[in-house]
Image (spheres, grey):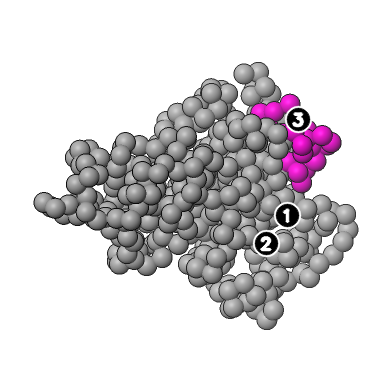
Amino acid sequence: MTVTEDLVFHLLKRYKPSTHNQKQLEIAYLAFIDYLACLSKGLETTKNQAFIKSFGLLGEKKIWFSSYSTTPERLALLQGYLAHYEDLDDVLVTYRGHPSAVIFSALLAVSENDVQLKDFLWSYVQGVELAGRLGQQFQPQHVKEGWHATATIGTLAATAAIGSLKQLSSDCFSQLLSLATSQASGFLYQEGTDGKPLNAGFAARNAVVAYQIIRSGLSAYADPFSSKRGWSQTIIGKALDSKQLLENWLQPSQLEKVGLWFKNYPICSAATAGLEAAQKAFELNLSLSEIESLVIHFTEDGDRALTHRTPQNGIEGKFSIEYITWLGLIKGKVDYSDFSENTVDQAFHQFRNLITRKNDLKASSEKRTICLEIITKEETYSFLVEDPKGSPANPLLEDDIFEKASQLSHGKLDVLFKIKERETLTLGEIKKLLSER
């Protein structure tokens, strides 16, 4: 049995009721609600409304929370883009990417209304598992080389979820994954532009297109994870460790062992600890005029995704620890308006010269630890944040996620919070509940 066949064997395992599996579905359901909330928020801008209108002219797949319909592959692209637009969607740190924006967008594009929610969510669990396990072998080298894992590994994760949902034959599933590897691409230089959330949309779309091609009867190389000439050799220069990839599959799952990072702020998760450290400084009523210098300490590659050191607009500012720290120091919080396409306040640029970065913290890069060191004439202050709110070690509670979803969707998702018998629901029934709001 090839590595690809062995992987497909695990991905084709269906949901079986158990306390362990039920826990995974509960996490997946929270992720689905969070995804829908982020999708709803992404629809609010005039620019994005125009975007979906230009794409929503033909097709039978309704774009959620809109009156437009489109084709399956365009639905995947649009909803992946919209769910990731504000950078509020969840993160899996082993993968160093955003699983839900990609996987759910792909699954919704190929799912009919009669699909049971438990099967839909189980397929998501399988996709997340592959994302995390690939990430454990690809990272941190993958991100150091400039790849955007949401787009690369995300394409594979979404494709795996589709194959799991559709219960394809082993041979077709292997070829499906093969076509996904041929499309898996995306780069971090898109950060600070619409290209970054579009990467999530492209990944979801590519998974759907791969499925459409295999369903039409075309073929592809059947062992993309081959130890001789597989995808990983091309991307990271070495064969996958098949034992690490497959051993104890879902026992425990990435969702349980690693956990999702449900985000509180519309910024890169790598900057969240820096914001919270700045908020601590703000509580001391430190005046910016007192600060002589400011050092932001990271782990060895903890700031790799924070690519903008001197952002020119708010979208670039989402990926700037300098800008985010400055916001925390001057007002103790961030707002959506801070991360618009508008030009960054000149006052930031005046303060920016005081800030330096150092990669000298001895901690796991998966924890996203940051230490903020502020030097004044009178004293040096140090603010260490290891587990910012929302991270797996300091998670948002279920009620926190529901509150976030209610705010982002303006109450449209509230009906989903109280559903008890979720396993018997279909996607069509979910849509009907939401349409009645």
Q: Circle 3 is placed at which residue position?
A: 68
Question: Circles 3 and 1: CB distance less than 8 Å?
Answer: no
Out of 355 and 124, give the one closest to the viewer.
355
Question: Circles 1 and 2: CB distance less than 8 Å?
Answer: yes
- 185 is higher (above) or lower (below) than 60: below
- The residue depicted at 58 percent of the width and 74 percent of the height is 236
Q: Is mark 1 on a helix, strand or loop?
A: helix
Residue 56 lies, in percent from the top left, at 77, 35
Out of 40 and 114, give the one closest to the viewer.
40
The kind of residue on which mark 2 rests is Ala
> In the image, which disc is placed on residue 206?
1
The kind of residue on which mark 3 rests is Tyr
Query: Which image quarter holds the C terminus?
Result: top right
- The residue depicted at 49 percent of the width and 53 percent of the height is 92
> Is 179 displayed left or right of 400 in the figure?
right
- The residue depicted at 62 percent of the width and 51 percent of the height is 195
Q: How many marks?
A: 3
Q: Circle 2 is placed at which residue position?
A: 184
Residue 261 lies, in percent from the top left, at 45, 47
Q: Give the range drawn in magenta.
A: 53-75
